[in-house]
Every structure is written in C-alpha cells, then in structure tokens.
Image (spheres, rainbow, N blue to C red):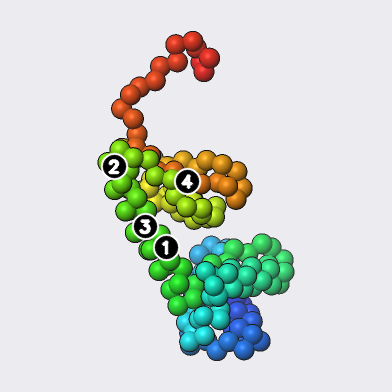
Amino acid sequence: MEWENVKKITSEFFEKMLVELDSLEVIQEDENIFYVKIKTTESSLVIGYSGKNLEDIRTILKGILSKINGKNVVLHLEVNDYLSKKEDKLFDFISKKIEIVKTGREVILPFFNSYERKKIHGYVSELKDDTIFTKSIGEWEERRMHICKKSKNITIDMDGIDI
C-alpha cells in the first residue's frame, strides 16, 4: 500500500466522521507501517477522554486499511501532537521517580497498560544507568511496574540448583 492511498482513505474517513482536518501528513515508515499526523480544531472529539477515542479511531482506521491492503497494516495516529506530549509527561514523571529510587527506595508505579510499560522499560534502559532497573510484577490488569536500585551484593548459588 502506498502512502498516497493511506492519505486518501484517512481523509475520506475523517470527512465521513464530519471532522474537519487542518492538515494531514502520512509518512511511510516501512512497507506496511504508516505514521499519520493530523491537525484539527476538533481534537477533543477525536482524542476523547484519556485518548480513548483516538485509540478506537486508530483501530477502526487500521482495520479499514488492512482490509483494503489485503495485508496487516501498522498505523500510528497522532492528533495535534497529543501522543508525543503525553509521552513527554510520562518520561518526566518517571525521571522524578528515578531520583527517589537513587536514594535507596523502590518505587511501585501506578497501573500502566502494556504499551506504556514497554515505553518505561525502554526509557530507563536508554538512560544507561547501571544503578537502576525496572521489572513488572503481576498479571493482566494487576501488573505493575517497579523501579529498583541495583544491589551491590552478589548472590552465589551454593547448592547448584541453577547450574
């Protein structure tokens, strides 16, 4: 699928939703991976509460594009830089929690979805700070992320069970 087709279909999709777009940009990142960036004065309608509408619209639009393409399409949908601003806020929040961890306390974060947890793991890893690490504990909706300080103590398995 070509980016021009994605642009045309996306434009028609929002037109049928009666959402007027100020601008629409489509970047083809790979064969079936597209980054769609729109600007609109109706962002509150498109984004919705906590980005719920945005995620639903992305899922529907991705389904339409995949059906037309005959292959699975990966779609990243950005509206008025909402996701990048949300990510910046998340990383600022995590940076503050990392400072607490450096004092020796473990921090258990609030519940995040799997995508956000992956972003947090990646962010902490990219810091290349050998004194901290992250781990996720729990299952499904109860899964929570922990930011911990690495211990300088070395554990040796004397009974050889893990050998």
Q: In the picture shown, does residue 156 fall above or below 13? A: above
Q: Secondary structure at mark 3?
A: helix
> Amino acid type of disc 3?
Phe
Q: Percent x, y for residue 75? A: 57, 67
2 or 4: tag closer to the N-terminus? 2
Q: Say the numbered circle drawn on residue 87.
A: 1
Q: Secondary structure at mark 4?
A: strand
Residue sitting at x 51%, y 53%: 111
Q: Residues within 10 Å of mark 2 (few under 14, many from 20)?
A: some
Q: Say the numbered circle drawn on residue 93.
A: 3
Q: In this rendering, does residue 61 appear at all? A: yes
> Amino acid type of disc 1?
Glu
Question: Label 4, label 3: how many angstroms apart (C-alpha)?
Answer: 13 Å
Left-right relation of 117 to 133: right
Q: Percent x, y for residue 33? A: 56, 64
Question: Which residue is the site of mark 4?
Answer: 145
1 or 3: tag closer to the N-terminus? 1
Q: Secondary structure at mark 1?
A: helix
Question: Label 1, label 2: how many angstroms apart (C-alpha)?
Answer: 22 Å
1 or 4: tag closer to the N-terminus? 1
Residue sitting at x 62%, y 89%: 18
Q: Are marks 4 and 3 in contact (CB under 8 Å)?
A: no
Question: Label 3, label 2: how many angstroms apart (C-alpha)?
Answer: 15 Å
Question: Label 1, label 4: how many angstroms apart (C-alpha)?
Answer: 17 Å
